[in-house]
């Protein structure tokens, strides 16, 4: 590698006017490192980002398919396992394009363009060809030194990647902080005397060993959906209707914070009013 540095990091009069010194050194540095890896059976690592969605049991409580716990995780590849050939400025017979370095496999099924950007970014026609492209922004000798490491990451500002998106994944368990874990949830219970109790907490704190979608839902639900959920919960918690509750009555109107419009009495009453109401009748 020292021989390579000596050859390429001194000013060279051989660099033509149409190709800057940095551009020439950049593509040759990548090519040199890749050839070295192939001959020595060493990896060339590429770290991209993969979007992962969690389908854990907590997410079902949100009751909204559009809300997902989605985060980015590293997706690591060994380029030499995909591409066992590399050539400088090889003409691509399929697209008619000529990348700075072309990586490909012996079967011809896989190709990847490597572009060195000094002043001009990758052309639109190359991007639109759909071939995976690694574009390295080379501004100094330190950038060329990075190319010689054989370890590249999308987290580095020097690298842009086109047409290479790691497949989206779904997992059953969520690791780390859930992106929807702070959604405010209502957790309902029925006391021994038939009173409704509501606890509010973030989704991530809901204990699934004692709670489920029967008694837990987002606080943001509309009044109609909230009332429907409460009725379903009461039927589950009090299957024999031991505790009269206005929300279960056929005379009940809109529910709001424990009060309802009673059509029979033509006034707003607390849900416990049913206990002494002669007109109470459970809605079928």
Image: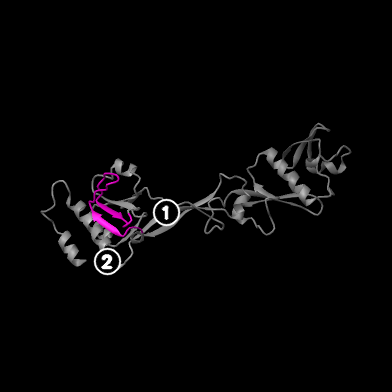
Quadrant in the picture for residue 140: bottom left
Give the quarter of the figure containing the C terminus. Answer: top right
Residue 238 position, x and y percent, is 80, 50
Question: What residue do we see at 73% from left, 45% from top?
Answer: 230
Which residue, given by chain and number where applicable, does mark 1 sit on?
Answer: 49
Q: In the image, which residues are magenta? A: 82-107
Is 83 one of the magenta-colored residues?
Answer: yes
Q: Magenta stretch: residue 276 in it? A: no
Near-viewer residue (30 or 188): 30
Q: Which mark sits nearer the N-terminus, 2 or 1?
A: 2
Of helix, strand and loop, which one carries label 2? helix
Relative height, residue 256 to residue 34 (above, below):
above
Judged by depth in the image, the label closer to the viewer, 2 or 1, is 2
* Residue 121 x/y as whole percent: 27, 45
Q: Residue furthest bottom?
A: 40
Return the x and y of residue 172 as percentages of the image width and height.
Answer: 56, 57
Please tell me how crowded label 2 is: few (under 14), some (14-19), or many (20+) other residues with Cα within 10 Å: few
Q: Nearer the viewer, residue 216 or 91?
A: 91
Q: Residue at x 66, y 48 (%)?
A: 217
- Name the image quarter holding the N terminus: bottom left
């Amino acid at each position: 590698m020292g021989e390579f540095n000596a050859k390429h990091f001194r000013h060279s009069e051989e660099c033509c006017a149409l190709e800057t010194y940095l551009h020439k050194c950049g593509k040759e540095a990548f090519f040199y490192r890749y050839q070295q890896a192939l001959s020595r059976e060493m990896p060339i690592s590429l770290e991209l980002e993969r979007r992962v969605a969690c389908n854990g049991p907590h997410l079902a409580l949100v009751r909204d398919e559009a809300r997902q716990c989605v985060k980015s995780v590293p997706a690591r590849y060994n380029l030499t396992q995909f591409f066992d050939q590399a050539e400088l400025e090889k003409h691509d017979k399929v697209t008619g394009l000529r990348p700075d370095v072309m990586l490909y496999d012996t079967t011809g099924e896989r190709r990847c363009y490597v572009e060195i950007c000094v002043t001009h970014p990758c052309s639109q026609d190359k991007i639109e060809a759909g071939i995976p492209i690694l574009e390295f922004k080379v501004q100094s000798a330190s950038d060329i030194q990075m190319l010689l490491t054989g370890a590249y990451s999308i987290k580095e500002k020097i690298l842009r990647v086109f047409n290479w998106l790691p497949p989206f994944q779904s997992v059953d368990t969520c690791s780390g902080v859930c992106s929807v874990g702070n959604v405010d949830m209502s957790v309902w219970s029925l006391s021994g005397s038939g009173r409704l109790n509501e606890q509010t907490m973030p989704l991530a704190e809901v204990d699934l060993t004692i709670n489920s979608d029967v008694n837990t839902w987002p606080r943001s639900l509309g009044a109609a959906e909230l009332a429907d959920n409460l009725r379903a919960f009461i039927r589950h918690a009090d299957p024999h209707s031991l505790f009269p509750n206005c929300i279960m009555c056929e005379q009940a109107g809109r529910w709001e914070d424990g009060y309802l419009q009673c059509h029979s009495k033509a006034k707003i009453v607390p849900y416990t009013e049913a206990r002494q109401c002669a007109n109470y009748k459970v809605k079928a």
